Amino acid sequence: MSRPRVRIFCDYSATGIWDYPLYPSDDDDQDWYPYFRTDVDTAHEPDRFILRDLALWNERWEAVFQAWVDTALYNEGTFDCSLFDPDAFTAEGFRLAYELKCNHPDWEVVYIDEVAYERNIASKQKERRSFTYEISLGDNGEMVLREL
């Protein structure tokens, strides 16, 4: 049995982030989430508190992220940008990915930085990057990032 893989990112429409050829098609999504499916018998089960925190993190994203993108990056809209700290949001996403990796060191944990991606799309000097990182553990248990 191959080791479980999980991608951590927020996106409610699956547009934009799939522009890069590094990501699987929508048809491949079931391969990324076998432990969340009811029809797959697996011993791998994510920590319920991390799942709760991921769900709350995603809810905050859904509530304000697009308004922040429109206002802060494109000067469209009237969103109070003080309600959303994109750098803190990214740091929290990395922290959640790291916690999941610590609890499941045999898993392949990948984090997609949606904030950096959106900032890149809005910039005049676009970088050809994936903004996708594999989370690993260093010799002392620290988070090690490798951009994919």
Image (cartoon, grey):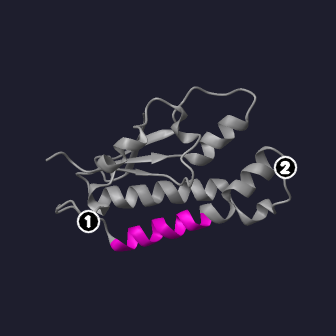
Q: The disc labelled 2 sits on which kind of residue? A: Glu
Cβ–Cβ below 8 Å for labels 1 and 2?
no
Of 64 and 144, which appears nearest the observer?
A: 64
Q: Give the structural element (helix, strand or loop) at label 2.
A: loop
Task: Determine the main secondary structure of the stretch shown in magenta.
Answer: helix
The residue under the point 57% across, 43% down is: 15
* Above or below 45: residue 66: above
Q: How many marks?
A: 2
The residue under the point 54% across, 65% down is: 57
Instruction: Give percent across and percent down for residue 131.
Output: 52, 38
Mark 1 to mark 2: distance in Å?
42 Å
Instruction: Give percent across and percent down for residue 78.
Output: 86, 59
The residue under the point 39% across, 50% down is: 143
Q: Which residues are magenta?
A: 48-60
* Above or below 26: residue 96: below
Q: Give the structural element (helix, strand or loop) at label 1.
A: loop
Query: Which residue does the numbered mark 2 point to in the structure image?
Result: 76
Quick check: is 9 in the magenta stretch? Answer: no
Q: The disc labelled 1 sits on which kind of residue? A: Thr
Of 17 and 114, which appears nearest the observer?
A: 17
Instruction: Give percent across and percent down for residue 118.
Output: 65, 42
Left or right of 29 in this view: 38: left
Residue 103 appears anywhere in the view: no
Q: Nearer the viewer, mark 1 or mark 2?
A: 1
Instruction: Give percent across and percent down for residue 83.
Output: 74, 66
Q: How many residues crowd mark 1 within 10 Å: few (<14), some (14–19), many (20+)?
A: few
Query: Which residue does the numbered mark 1 point to in the structure image?
Result: 38
The dot on residue 24 is none
Left or right of 5 in this view: 66: right
